[in-house]
Image: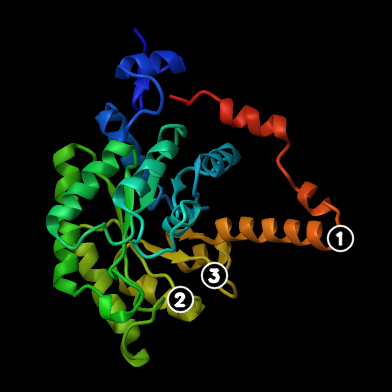
Amino acid sequence: MRRQWGYFAEGASVEEKKDEEGHGGAVPLRRLRMDIQGQARKAELLRKLHTSGRILVLANVWDVASARIFEEMGFPAIATTSAGIAASLGYPDGQLISREEMLDVVGRIARVVHVPVTADLEAGYGPTIEDMTATVKAMAQAGAVGMNLEDVTGSDESTHVDLATQVEKIQAIRRAGEAIGVPLVLNARTDIYLMPIGPEATRFERTVERCRAYRKAGADCLFVPGIKDAATITKLVKAIDGPLNILATAGGPNVNELQAMGVARVSMGSGVMRSTLGHARRVGRELLERGTFESMLDGAVPFAELMAIMSRQKLS
């Protein structure tokens, strides 16, 4: 009897996978079979990566190819970038993409890697508790075992969700995961520094208040993008009473420095995706201005290597 992994029997051919679902072509997420026990194990592994004593480094991905590249390199978990996925599908960032479109890409990624996948799901795709529950169910169906939740729903501080409502959302997400049987890893984000929101003089205190409340409500990690000052990061680590996630930014501390400060997790956000687009722009400029293509070949993954990575069987 074949062992089950993810959504299909291990070793099943593409044709068998199609036949198991009763049709050919792409497999809709709603028709995939969940492996609750397997996802629960991945969720616990992802949770432990936040408390192992070694900083969790996440090079956020936006498609299957970037996910497999980073998995092959040895990253212990895969995180998605909402901005990267949205841009690849023709949307600006800011929850303008639908839940279904976002999770379609997340599901494609989760189905082809064996490490835990945590998804950036913006503000949860809706303002209500029912929306949070629906998002968690769809996320679990897609195969992700962790998620980011922001506390802003738009592009300015008027969209900052009030603290009590955000706490209720986090509690609802935690309950939904428990009901499914997947103890998902929730990374609760506050944008007080990144946007920024409110007076600078009270920014730190308000961030601590939010982080402590989110942690008490059930968040596993607290994400505070927009800080790159070492003294503030060190102070925040000691104040929030929980694992801290920092966004890698120009001029900020490097990974080793963040670990020395006690930071539990550092993510690249849309940085790797934007770096890739920057390289594409350089290639295009060289082609238009010089008629040469040396930059295209510089550091490119060989075609045969890419095909081998993309053809690899998912590990159990």
Q: Which residue has dot 2 on it?
A: 227
Image mark for residue 249: 3
- Quadrant (top left, top right, bottom left, bottom right) of the N terminus: top left
Answer with mark 2 or mark 3, whichever residue precedes in sequence.
2
Q: Which residue has dot 1 on it?
A: 290
Q: CA distance from mark 2 to mark 1?
A: 40 Å
Q: Is residue 236 left or right of residue 71?
A: left
Q: Is residue 123 visible?
A: yes
Q: Which residue lies at the image location 30% right of the left edge and 16% below the top edge?
A: 22
| In-front residue for pair 208/105 | 105
Specify few, some or many for label 2: CA neighbours under 10 Å numbering under 14, 14-19, or 20 or more: some
Q: CA distance from mark 3 to mark 1?
A: 32 Å
* Residue 264 sits above or below residue 201 on the image: above
Specify few, some or many for label 3: CA neighbours under 10 Å numbering under 14, 14-19, or 20 or more: some
- Quadrant (top left, top right, bottom left, bottom right) of the C terminus: top left
Q: Amino acid at mark 3?
A: Thr
Q: Amino acid at mark 1?
A: Arg
| In-front residue for pair 199/254 | 199
Q: CA distance from mark 2 to mark 3?
A: 8 Å
How far from the left and from the top, in percent, is residue 6? 35, 28
The mark closer to the camera, 3 or 1, is 1
Q: Which residue lies at the image location 42% right of the left edge and 49% below the top edge?
A: 52
